[in-house]
């Protein structure tokens, strides 16, 4: 699924993995924040302070950030999320945007 350039109301999903327990991490939304880089520029904190967990039961480890229009106004979108919980790894998301 593409990320549309300069378009509001889109979402970015990240996966949280607990390296110590070797399983997906659930119940950690309040501890996860993200930074966004547009076109390889300086990182700025996401306007969505914390993501929403999709489903701890049916989709464990998946968290969703809401994106606003200015955050998608780029050709190369990068989102790097981190958790303050020890041992949690979140893979960065790197996407080339498409025109709507």
Image: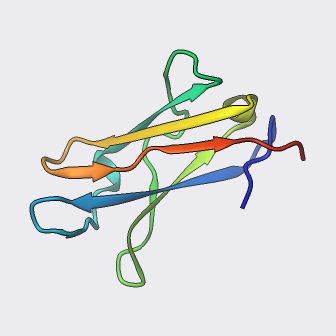
Q: For residue 6, what is the image quadrant?
A: top right
Q: How many labels does the image show?
A: 0
> What residue appears at the point 11 percent right and 68 percent down from the top-left corner?
21
Q: For residue 62, what is the image quadrant?
A: bottom left
> Please, is residue 91 above or below residue 73 in the view?
below
Q: Where is residue 34 in the image (x, y as percent from the top left)?
A: 43, 37
Hey, which residue is sitting farthest right in the picture? 100
Quadrant holding the N terminus: bottom right
> What residue appears at the point 51 percent right and 38 percent down from the top-left corner?
79
Q: Position of residue 94 (x, y in %)?
A: 56, 42
Hey, which residue is sitting farthest top in the picture? 42
Q: For residue 95, what is the image quadrant?
A: top right
Q: Is residue 30 left or right of residue 100?
A: left
Q: Position of residue 27 (x, y in %)?
A: 28, 64
> What residue appears at the point 35 percent right and 55 percent down from the top-left corner?
29
> Please, is residue 85 above or below residue 57 in the view?
above
Q: Is residue 31 left or right of residue 78?
A: left
Hey, which residue is sitting farthest left in the picture? 20
Give the colour scheme of this rendering. rainbow
Q: Where is residue 76 in the image (x, y as percent from the top left)?
A: 67, 32
Q: In this view, does 52 lie to the left or right of 27?
A: right
> Please, is residue 10 above or below residue 45 in the view?
below
> What residue appears at the point 73 percent right and 49 percent down from the top-left corner?
3
Q: Nearer the viewer, residue 100 or 40?
A: 40
């Amino acid at each position: 699924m593409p990320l549309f350039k300069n378009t509001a109301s889109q979402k970015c999903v990240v996966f949280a993995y607990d390296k110590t327990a070797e399983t997906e991490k659930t119940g950690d939304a309040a501890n996860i924040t993200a930074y966004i880089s547009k076109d390889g520029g300086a990182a700025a904190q996401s306007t969505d302070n914390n993501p929403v967990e999709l489903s701890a039961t049916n989709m464990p480890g998946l968290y969703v950030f809401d994106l606003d229009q200015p955050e998608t106004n780029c050709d190369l979108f990068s989102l790097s999320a981190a958790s303050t919980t020890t041992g949690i790894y979140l893979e960065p998301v790197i996407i080339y945007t498409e025109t709507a």
